[in-house]
Amino acid sequence: MRRARLIGTVGVAVLVLAGCGSLTPVTEQGHDVRNLYNILFVAAAVVFVLVEGAIVFAVVRYRRRGDMLPPQFHGNNLLEVVWTVVPLLIVAALFVLGGDTLTDFALALLVGIGVGTWSSMFVATPLLVAFEQRSSRQPVRRRLRPRSSGSRI
């Protein structure tokens, strides 16, 4: 167990430190890529800390105590908007700051976010309403024909 923990720790350290190299860029595009990498690294670290903090907060705040069920929440419109706007802002920043390196990729991501949001709002929601209305109706009972007791040859 101790040896596995040591191997795991060394493996994680190697993976983390692999992205922290101090290679000096030679070309102008290399400088742009490195600057963009540093900006994205800071942005990703901030998002990681916020998400992990939210997870720890939720685990501590809403854990089960005794036999009582923690409060249940269903649907939060503000959270849905935040889940759309925050990635949109991050990708828009990539589009603006990406220069020649990431502009096309960020544009594709922006289109994907827009299409996904449109799909959720205007395609999935009406389908959900239709399925809910359909499932609320009484089921249709069909009479089954009695089977013949004779065997077929």
Image (cartoon, grey):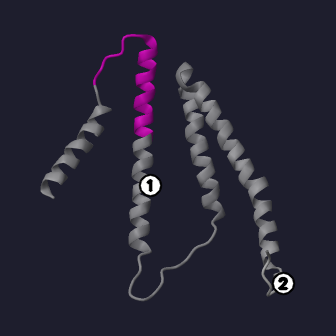
Q: Residue at x 44, y 74 (%)?
A: 62
Work out which quarter of the rendered image holds the C terminus and state it.
bottom right
Residue type of the residue flagged with mark 2: Leu
Whether 100 is drawn above or below 147: the answer is above
Query: Which x, y percent locates residue 94?
Result: 55, 32
* Residue 29 part of the magenta-drawn span: yes
* Residue 74 part of the magenta-drawn span: no
Please report contact status of discs 1 and 2: CB closer than 8 Å, yes or no: no
Q: Residue at x 81, y 67 (%)?
A: 130
Relative side of 85 to 34, left or right: right
Relative side of 124 to 18, left or right: right
Residue 144: which disc?
2
What secondary structure characterizes most of the magenta part? helix
Pointer 1 local density, CA inside 10 Å: few below 14, some 14–19, many at least 20:
few
Q: Residue at x 70, y 42 (%)?
A: 114
Specify start and end residues of the magenta stretch as a single range: 22-43
Question: On the image, numbered disc 1 is attached to which residue?
Answer: 51
Query: Which x, y percent locates residue 36?
Result: 45, 27
Residue type of the residue flagged with mark 1: Val
Work out which quarter of the rendered image holds the N terminus and state it.
bottom left
Location of residue 148 (image quadrant): bottom right
